[in-house]
Image (cartoon, rainbow, N blue to C red):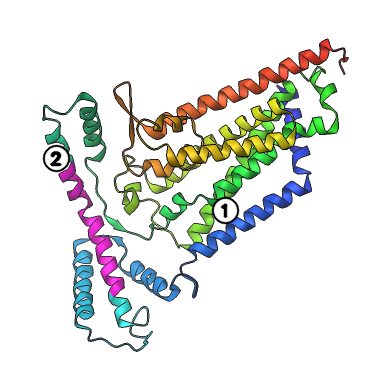
Amino acid sequence: MKKILTLSRFELKKLFIKKSLMVIIAFMCLFNIINIVRHYNIYADGGLNDGMFNRAKYTVLKLYGGELTEEKLNEIYRMKSQAQELAASGNYSLKYDPDKYYCGYAFGDAMIFIELADEAKRLADYSDNFSKLVSESEELLKKDFINDYYKKINQKATEIYSSRELTALTNNKGISDFFDYKFSSVLCIILLILGTVLIFTADRDAGADVYLESSVNGKGKSAAAKLIASSLYTLALTLLFFVIDLISFMVLLRIDGLEQPLYSLSSYFSTPLTMPIWQFIILYFLFRILGFLCITAVTSAITVILKTPILSVIASFALFMAMIVCKTYCLSDSKRWINLFNPLVPITAPKYLKRYDAMNIFSEPVIFIGATALCVLIITALAVCTVMALSSLKGASRKRGGVKNV
């Protein structure tokens, strides 16, 4: 094991001394940050968004945010009523007055308070609305025409959505944009394919593969070291891009309220998860690691089979494109099972956890993302076994060919 770890360290060193790869990684990180700033810098003046209006909304939210008491709700509703009356009458000043209005304009302030009140009402009514849904689900269970599978779904839904409530108004809406952001994943996959192919073809390009595969450190030890090195490279890249994304969104969108439950987000109001948002961020990171490790393992297997860097990169990117097509178009119940083996699904896990998304597996409702995670883990293990088996066979054939141990 010590030899394998030593070899892994050498493999990583060989990878990271390649200046061209480091330049590409740095460029990708910078490109990613620029893309986030370009699309999500909502508090800046100019561009696609009205920074002054958004800054005013943030100021009002900080004034009325926090615990939603009855007194605070009444005050917010009162401000909404006044805003609606003002907007309906048309009797308001068009003059810019930053000393009197949060955004500088009377009508703008009216829209801010209407939007704030709607969000406060959504949070305050959340418990009652889901209590009604749970009651309807319980009544549905008593119907004779419901088959066993749908009865099980309703039973689970009743358990999941019971006793939920929201009691705080925070500025956590922007974290949904972080969960939906996919551009960095594409960049990360490109870098993973390039790095993994480099790790598995560097010895061949240097002409050292003949001696290494037939040496005492061959017979799978070299392959195991390369797999560990590529896995560490994957973990490092995943962490790098994840941290860049999270910090960028947190800073640009001034996100807070991560201690609130995940279902406090409007786009996750029917999620089956009850954990706080900060815990879901960690879970999302783990799902991304799983998906990226699977892509790394499959790329490793492709490279060991095809041997040459160019063919390996082309085949890996072709497979990546096929994954995108399957994820995009295989959505019906008859085709959805294909995506159980698609590593892009755990990479985009939040999409599948916005609601109770189950599959019928042997007449049992199984959470789709959970079943996919298990299948992707199996694919990863099979790819690793393929790499080890093929590398051991090549090492044995080299010895039979007459190359001495070194």
Residue 265 visible within the image? no
Residue type at the position of mark 2: Ser
Q: Residue farthest to the top?
A: 400
Secondary structure type for disc 1? helix
Mark 2 lies on a secondary structure that is helix
Total tally of numbered discs in the picture? 2
Height in image: 291 above or below 248? above
Q: Tell me the tag on residue 244.
A: 1
Percent coordinates x, y for residue 338 in the rendering: 45, 30
Quarter of the figure with the N terminus? top right
Asked if labels 1 and 2 touch by Cβ distance under 8 angstroms, the answer is no
Q: CA distance from mark 2 to mark 1?
A: 43 Å
Please name the amino acid that badge 1 sits on: Ile
Residue at (53% x, 53% y) in the render:
245
Residue 171 is drawn in which quadrant? bottom left
Q: Is residue 200 above or below residue 85?
A: above
Please provide percent x and percent y for residue 316: 63, 36
> Label 2 belongs to which residue?
135
Q: Range of the magenta residues?
A: 111-133
Front-lying residue, 61 or 29 = 29
| On screen, residue 102 above or below 39 | below
Q: Is residue 34 magenta?
A: no
